[in-house]
Image: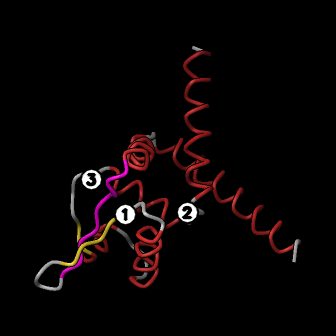
């Protein structure tokens, strides 16, 4: 039993590193879990908006941030509709799949740890100025 826990702990560390390195916000974290549950889907903004209960501007900003980081890809079709999907990068897809497959309580614990780490980094950055 301990061996399973330690193996899972190492995976969480690399996943946390991925999220921290990409400075994922809480909304981005939730978007990655959502997109990870639909790994082959090409979803438009309106479909994604229906799944979240947050301001459209915040969701749009998070989507664009993930596109800029190379985690999500976006495509404009001939009718002017933008769709979002996971990037083709295998390593990124692996982390997003792992994030989506986490149990809810483990995911919330990881989200809190990510939030704490990013706040710590912001404090260090502010102190260095």
Residue at 55% of width from left, 34% of height from top? 11
Q: Give the residue at mark 1.
A: 72
Image quadrant where residue 83 sits: bottom left
**What residue occupies the far left of the structure in this picture?**
78
Give the crowd class for mark 2: few <14, some 14-19, many >=20 residues within 10 Å.
many
Distance, label 2 to label 1, CA atoms, is: 13 Å
Colour mapping:
secondary structure
Disc 3 crowd rating (10 Å Cα; few below 14, some 14-19, many 20+) is: some
Per the image, label 3 sits on a secondary structure element best described as loop
Residue 84 in magenta stretch: yes
Q: Position of residue 59 (x, y in %)?
A: 42, 76
Using the image, determine if residue 83 lies above or below residue 37: below
Q: Is residue 93 left or right of residue 50?
A: right
91 vs 38, left or right, is right
The location of residue 102, given as percent across then percent down, is 45, 40
In the depicted structure, whether residue 14 falls above or below residue 26? above
Which badge, 2 or 3, is on the more N-terminal residue?
2
The residue wearing badge 3 is: 38
Secondary structure type for disc 2: loop
Q: Secondary structure at mark 1?
A: strand
Marks 3 and 1, the one that precedes in the sequence: 3
* Place of residue 101 in the rendered image (x, y in percent of width and height, measured from the top left): 39, 40
**Can you give x and y, in whole percent of width and height, for residue 25 in the image?**
56, 66
* Residues at marks 2 and 3 touching, judged by CB atoms closer than 8 Å: no
Pointer 2 and pointer 1: residues touching (CB < 8 Å)?
A: no
Residue drawn where x is 48% and y is 66% of the image: 69
Task: Measure the alpha-carbon separation of dots 3 and 1.
Answer: 12 Å
Q: Nearer the viewer, residue 83 or 9?
A: 83
Crowdedness near tag 1: few (<14), some (14–19) or many (≥20) residues, C-alpha within 10 Å: many
- Per the rendering, the mark at residue 24 is 2
| The magenta segment | 81-89
């Amino acid at each position: 039993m301990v061996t399973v826990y330690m193996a899972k702990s190492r995976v969480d560390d690399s996943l946390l590193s991925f999220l921290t390195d990409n400075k994922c916000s809480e909304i981005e974290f939730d978007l990655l879990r959502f997109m990870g549950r639909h790994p082959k889907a090409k979803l438009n903004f309106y479909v994604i908006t229906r799944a979240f209960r947050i301001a459209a501007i915040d969701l749009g900003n998070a989507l664009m941030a993930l596109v800029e980081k190379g985690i999500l890809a976006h495509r404009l079709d001939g009718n002017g509709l933008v769709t979002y999907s996971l990037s083709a990068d295998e390593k990124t897809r692996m982390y997003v799949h792992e994030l989506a497959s986490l149990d809810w309580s483990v995911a919330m614990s990881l989200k809190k740890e990510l939030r704490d780490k990013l706040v710590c980094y912001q404090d260090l950055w502010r102190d260095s100025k």
